[in-house]
Amino acid sequence: MELLLIFISAALVNNFVLSYFLGICPFIGVSNKTSSAISMGMATTFVMVLTAIVSWLLFNLILVPYKLEFLQIPSFILVIAALVQFVEMVIKKVSQPLYRALGIFLPLITTNCAILGLALLASMRNYNFLESVIFGAGAGAGFTLALIIMAGIREELDLADVPKPFQGAPITLIVAGILALAFMGFAGMI
Amino acid sequence: MKKQVTLLKEFTKGLWEINPTFKQILGMCPTLAVTVSAINGIAMALATTFVLVFSSLLISIVRKWIPNQVRIASYIVIIATFVTIVDLVMKAQFVELSKALGPFIPLIVVNCIILGRAEAFASKNNPLRSVLDALGNGAGFLISLFVLGSIREIIGSRTILGYQVLPNGFEPWLIMILPAGAFLTLGLLMGFANMYIERKKNLEREALIAQYRRVGKEEITDEVLKEAGV
């Protein structure tokens, strides 16, 4: 039950993009087309779950026992960068179609603040191992959901007559605001 | 070889010409997340500027010794070092602010403004210019965070920097201090900024056309106008 709550909270109620403002750059940058939004969402979810596992192990098995918590930021970012690189190499070797679908999005994920934010939030809240993994999966699902909804709206928006100064980033932000309002409807769930 | 710009220009261009928020659209996450009040915005911008200035300086000093292949990784390690300093100092000295900004202080590491300036400027220019560029961009970031934070604070809780400015009869708009308000305010601000730029450009264009007419120049093509930079 506790785990289900963490999942729903990360995916809907405290959606990473729309209420924590993490991962805004890909949210605005890659939400032009639904197909690339799905690929980006999948790649990010995959890396998020892996990051949750690896950062929990790193923090609780290495940094805490040796009293090195002050190295948290550099060590997390290095581990994430290495992990993304590793995942890219593995996918390239194992599955070419998957690499073509996710490949170009993987390098972008290293500097996605949602990933580092996930690792930091999980250790800040003292989640245990299983909770961290569920938290990562929920955050990834929420990110994917927000990205796909946004891409769907933006595809329609291309046909709309937006005033010229508001084209591009401004209208995207306004749409995101309305979307955030809609997601506030989930607030009463827990 | 591109034209050497003056040192002053290196600083002032960050204020508006390449303003990180409005022109480069970088560093969106902290911009949206911490601007619930003006003071949070200022604190965030100052922390970011500190990291930006010192990492630009260090990167610019060691730029000749960093092999090209591992440059991004080296930049990130340098940036992470300064972020750790800021994070620890904030936790020790400004407990309240540190709590209000939450994970966004450690997240300065992945703020694209810093890596962006490191890659686009500090890795190619000497330390003095890099520091000026970093200061300019930091100041530009400060301006946009302060404007955004002030608007949200005034309308959302009737105060600015903690002082009440709107009368009690004004009902605060709750939405402004909620996440949705951040998106809406920034979107509208950006739109109005674009509108202003567009209008200014049109005015300049018309002035130039009028000037050409006066001196009796017949052909006013788009190329001519483009060359004049309007």
Image (cartoon, rainbow, N blue to C red):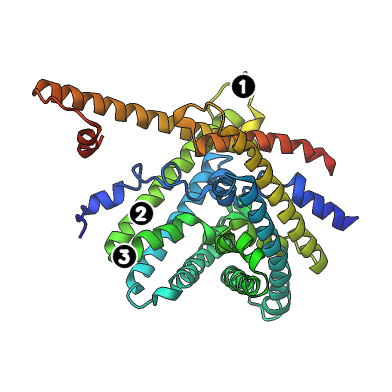
Residue located at (67% from left, 38% from top): A180
Give the amino acid at mark 3.
Lys
Q: Which residue is tagged 3?
A: B124
> In the visual, does B32 lie left or right of B53?
right
Residue located at (76% from left, 64% from top): A126
Name which of mark 1 and mark 3 comes first in the sequence.
Answer: 3
- Say which of marks 1 and 3 sits in front: 3
Q: Are marks 2 and 3 in contact (CB under 8 Å)?
A: no
| Residue B210 visible in rendering | yes
Q: Nearer the viewer, residue A43 or B191?
A: A43
Q: Which of the labelled discs sits on residue B168, or is there none?
A: 1
Give SS at disc 1. loop
Give the amino acid at mark 2.
Leu
Name which of mark 1 and mark 2 comes first in the sequence.
Answer: 2
- Say which of marks 1 and 2 sits in front: 2
Chain for disc number 2: B
